[in-house]
Image (cartoon, grey):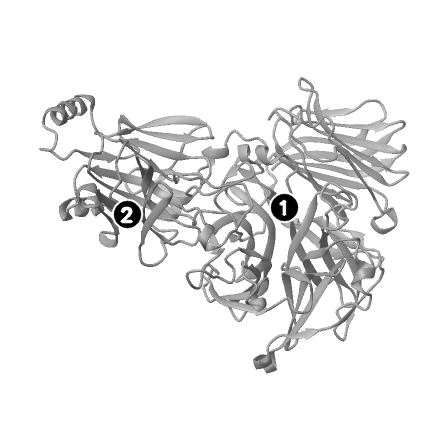
Amino acid sequence: MRIFRLKSRYCPVLFFSMLVYLLFFSGAYAAEQNVNFDSDHSAFSIETQFKSPDFTPGISGKAWRTDGFSSFATLKLAQTVQTTLSIGTWVAIESYPSDAEVTVDNLTPSAFFHLPTENGDISVFIDTFGRWGVSATQGNETVSAYAEGKFPTYSWAHIALTVDISNSKARLYFNGNESALLNLPDEVVFNSSEVVFAKPRLNKQILNFTVNWLNGAFDDINVLHAPLDKNHLKKWLNVSPDETALQALAVPSSRFEDDHLRPSFHAMPPANWTNEPHGLVRKNGSWHMFYQRTPNGPYKTQMHWGHMLSDDLVRWTNLQDALWPELQNEKFGFDMKGIWSGDVIVEDGVGFAFYTSVNHFDRLKAANPGISMAISTDENLLHWEKKGPIINTQHVKDFRDPYLWREDDSWHMIIGAAYEGYGGLDYYVLDLKEQDKGWRHKRQFSDIAYRLLDIGSDIWEMPVFEPLDDETHVLVVNPIGGDVQKYGEPATRGVYWTGKWENGVFSPNYKEPKMLDIIVGHLSPTVARADDNDLRAIGIVDERRSSQAQEDAGWTHTFSLPRRWFLMPDQKTLGQAPAPELELLRQSLLHEEEALNLADSATNIDVKVNQYELLLDGIEWHTDVLTISLMKNKLKGEHTSLSFNHKTGEIRLDKTLSNSNNEDEGPQVLSGNYDADAFSEIKKIRVFVDGSVVDVFINDAAAFSFRVYPSSSESSAVSINAEGSAVLIDKLAVWQM
């Protein structure tokens, strides 16, 4: 944990004079402090796990941007608090603090700031549902006074607190108006001359993560050792923000500038934890992608829906979160435990979001879990109105992750489901001519029983169902649980079937599913159609390092590169090519060779960057094995090996020496079988390297993605060699991305 000291506006002479004055005339003068992050005298210390604190455009000058899980600040007061203290600050929060997924009575709120007392604290608190106010804790007892309404997100607000122990009162102000009055316990005694910002006195832990600190920006902190009067409050409020709260809440690039493992041209949130992308949808020519997110740290709890926007599918802008857990009354909310994955459709300019909503109560069976709906009439799908649950689990053991499509005057919805001992789907249809009848359950989606299609899982997740041509549809699911394990066999991965869709029934071409990727590492894609009417798909390439490594990094998981989906000539196999939009990201040509013969020795390329595309085109085989070594560093002995066996079809990924710090979890040697009958003899290999994520495409038809964690940014060289006789390559090229 690094500690950084910031400054108040006192010059040294003035500060010394004031201390002398206070020492001899205590009580005759009310000491006042103003702390601004552009100031010049030590009074403020910030702790953070990163190289330095984050600073962003603020109310006046720079604001301090918290990271939500490792940073907090301590203000040293000009004098020890005895009976009275007033504090005011401008604050903007990106999200409500996280918590464990527990009932309301068991929450551990965060704090904008708290004042330590002899046996507790006085806190301006906020909980994970946005309820906030002032509290006083004495021993094991806490008394609270709530402010009216939820605290706003994505906007600057001014909060102020006056604590007067002499009359046992604490008054809370919001934007200049009194919003809560708390009667303090008689036993409250101050014992500190400091105020702590962005964290509560009591922390909530999940694994190695502290989850209930505050994710926001602070600026222009004022302290008065006296009751707050109208003149001081007016003065504290008399500022005009230099920039918007959205600019203050942007994660500065400096936070991760030394992290060579963080991808730069893959879509991903600005920080913290993400999981499945979903709800990829186009509106007015722009791509919107929604995704699972914990905005407050690199851990999983109380899922939000993140939201990002792109004009070209490859360069993304982060937008404010679309959905997050809420309460409908003091104790209950139908999605209070999390906004899980789903789908988004746009009809006549209106967005409809369908998501899995989870809560703590089974008295409302219709909603635990449930498929819930929200509607957005906003031009950019920024603001959503929740309509509540529309479907329950009455026909299955469990379900999650709806997927929708329209046929004529009907909407169809499939939901990943759990049956007794196997995974499958739950299927519903909404007739738009008879909407008042609601969603009708359909007993059959597939003419082959799910138990015969399943691979030993408990439940199917993230289904996708789309036509590949006039005759063939593809069904993609992600079986998990049961015999399926992240690091086991069968492994957690996307699988699919192609087949015919006719009269509301899917007829798969085969019982045993095909693997979406040749090698495990990528799953749960979301899809939408581009201008060429082909599908584009983006999945998740999940972490393969420890939770402690994820905390140390400050971010977890990334999305895959966009892929173009199409039907192979055999009419049974899904083809996956790099999306043509990716060529927009090519920058300088770093290396190029033609008519390359690998018979004599390996070809070595000193790439010197961690983001590039490698192309091998026009491959002619005169031996069995071609090996590409990526992320190579001779001094550290690091490299990651990809071997392509032309004779057997085996593709082998060897990460045994990929990381000298041993941060890569799970099997270090992975393999899969390349289907030359479906994809043809290997003639073309494209490899995209971006920090710790690698996407591989063969013949622009077969694909896989994986994660790897070289310890040094200088582990970037590439070597290519053939084992045995010759491999001829018409063109070898490397582009910086």
Residue in the image at 76% along x and 42% along y:
488
SS for dot 1 = helix
- The x and y percentages for residue 241 are 28, 46
- The x and y percentages for residue 118 are 30, 34
When asked about the image quadrant of residue 665, the answer is: top right
Q: Which residue is mark 2?
A: 159
When asked about the image quadrant of residue 434, the answer is: bottom right
SS for dot 2 = strand
Task: List the single residue furthest toward the top.
Answer: 635
Quadrant of image for the C terminus:
top right
Indicate the amino acid at tag 2: Ile
- The x and y percentages for residue 280 are 59, 57
Distance (Cα) linking label 2 and label 1? 46 Å
Reading the chain from its start, which is encountered first: label 2 or label 1? 2
Residue in the image at 11% along x and 33% along y:
27
Residue 248 visible? The answer is no
Q: Residues within 10 Å of mark 1 (few under 14, many from 20)?
A: some
Relative horizontal placement of residue 260, taking residue 396 as reference (left or right): left
Front-most of residues 27 and 251: 27
Residue in the image at 71% along x and 56% along y:
459
Residue 158 visible? The answer is yes
- Rendered position, 577 above or below 280: above
Relative horizontal placement of residue 3, taking residue 311 as reference (left or right): left
- Tag shown at residue 230: none
Front-most of residues 597 and 492: 492
**Of marks 2 and 1, the one in the foreground:** 2
Front-most of residues 368 and 149: 368
- The x and y percentages for residue 166 are 17, 42
Front-most of residues 470 and 451: 451
Relative horizontal placement of residue 524, taking residue 372 as reference (left or right): right
Q: Which residue is mark 1?
A: 582
Indicate the amino acid at tag 1: Leu
